[in-house]
Each structure stands twice: as structure tokens, then as C-alpha cells.
Amino acid sequence: MMDRIAASHPIGIFDSGVGGLTVLSALRRRLPGESFLYLGDTARLPYGTKSAGTVQRYALKAAAHLLHHDVKLLVVACNTATSFALPELIDASPVPVAGVVEPGVRAALALGVHRIGVIGTEGTIRSGSYQRALARMDGSVSVRAVPCPLFVPLAEEGWGDHPVTDQVAQTYLTPLLEWGAEALILGCTHYPLLVPSLQRVVGPEVTLVDSASSVADAVATSYADLLERDLGGRGELFVHLTDASDHFLKVARHILGTLPEHLEVVHLDPDGRG
Ligand code: DGL
């Protein structure tokens, strides 16, 4: 039976899988009174290897599902969906939509470094979203962007601190280290789950920029008018998945410190296929 979503409108948040939980966790810490409805589109994971058109379609379906549950705000906790579909989501949504690319760029530029590496899915890097945002917000920084397609499966597997991840990271990141990257934007919400391995490989001199807390700050400050009336309450967490996933639950328990209170498998297509 379907869980009743909290009477107050929750904040809707989605990703293809577990990655967006890093953003959810930061949002819950920042806004403890809010209720959240998290959609993990596990039936369609990964987004990062798909074409722009396909990701737009998936993202619009995910957003429609959340809007159907009366969310008051949509957080796109996926860089690939933000990169390919943010304008379409904004057009389609009657409530405000927050993406993850700009907050990540802002956090990186706040470090005051000159050489910024960006890592993300093939889609995010191919879209040029980070390269454009960095150039627009500070034309003086040098930027190199590298796709790391094997990182999402490693994060989904829960191998964030693992010799295999170290080896894969070594291969992807050595060119960025040789180039002299001072900071590395984790341009995929799955990548913070790999920080133990990534930091070991890049060394202590390179700052890893996890945009989760900047996204939470941006939401808290930009949409204060929507959040005020919920202050003081105790937020609930509703999780909808488009496919049952043991990996999801294992990683969710690790990130959130507990299993979601309300968990449901949902279908986004009327014919029931995912
Ligand atoms: N976590 C997502 C991102 O931030 C996408 C991972 C995937 O589905 O490929 O890009």
C-alpha cells in the first residue's frame, strides 16, 4: 500500500540512483524540519552514458512523478540531468527547480585556485555544462574536464574505499594531476561516495569539491520563503525507486545512517515498464 506523503509539501529530489543521496543528506542536515521525497530512477540507471534526448525524457518523467506528489521544490540531484535538461525542467515545472552544476562551480571558485579539473559522467562532460559555467563565472581559471564512466558502477557497488577504485582513479586522474590541477570538481553526485579512494590517489594537496553542501546552502537561501512555514517541524523521508535495489538500501544506510522510513517501488511509465 502506498505510503501517505506528509501533509506539508515535501521537497522533491531525484537522481538515477544512490548518488543524489549525497545531496539529500546535506539538505537534511541543513533543513532538518523539511520532509523529502527522493526518487531514485534505478530502473534507468545510468543516465551518464545516455544521449541528451534520452536523459531529458527520463528527467521530465522523474520530475512529473515528484510533481504529482505535490512537491514544493524540485532538486535535480544529478549532474547529467542538470547538464542536459535543466531548462526543460524549469519550463515544465510549476515549482522552482534547483540544479547542481552552478553551486559546484561556485564552491570551486571560492577556493581561489587557478587550475580546476572537472570529473563527471560522459554525458556531463560532453555537454560542456561545467566548462561553460566556469568560463562565465570566472574567465581567468584554466579548466580540464575528464569523463570517468567507471566511477558510477563503483559507487553503486559501495566500493568507495577499495583498491580497484584506486586503480581506476589512477588511470583517469593522472593526466589531471600531471597538468597541475589544484582542485577537482566532483561533477557527479555519485563521486562523493568514492572520496576515500579519490583523495588517496590525488593526494592531500588537491581539494576535492563536493557540491552537496553548496546545493543545500543555495536551496536554503534562494527558497527561504518556501521553507519558512515548515521550520520547527520534524521532517520525514519518503524514498521511491523505479526498481528494487539492494545496493541502494546498503548505500542509503551508509549515507543516511539509517534506512529510509518510507520506501516504495514505483513505475513512471503507464505501462509499468520502469
Ligand atoms: N549521479 C548522476 C550524476 O550526477 C548520474 C549517474 C549516472 O546515472 O550515470 O551525473
Image (cartoon, rainbow, N blue to C red):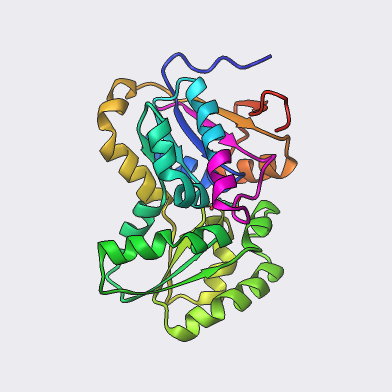
Q: In the image, which residues are magenta? A: 34-58
User: What x and y, as percent, mark residue 197?
Assistant: 59, 67
Magenta span contains residue 42: yes
Q: Is residue 110 visible?
A: no
Q: Which residue lies furthest to the front in this view?
A: 53
User: Residue 112 vs residue 84: left or right?
Assistant: left
Q: Nearer the viewer, residue 201 or 85?
A: 85
Q: Quadrant of residue 260?
A: top right
In the rendered view, would you say 66 is above or below 192?
above
Q: Which of 164 and 68 is in front in this view?
A: 68
Q: In which quarter of the image is the C terminus?
A: top right
User: Residue 97 vs residue 84: left or right?
Assistant: left
Please report the residue visible at 66 percent of the width from the left and 63 percent of the height from the top.
150
Q: Is residue 129 visible?
A: yes
User: Residue 140 vs residue 262: left or right?
Assistant: left
User: What x and y, as percent, mark residue 121?
Assistant: 56, 60
Please report the residue visible at 47 percent of the width from the left and 31 percent of the height from the top.
12
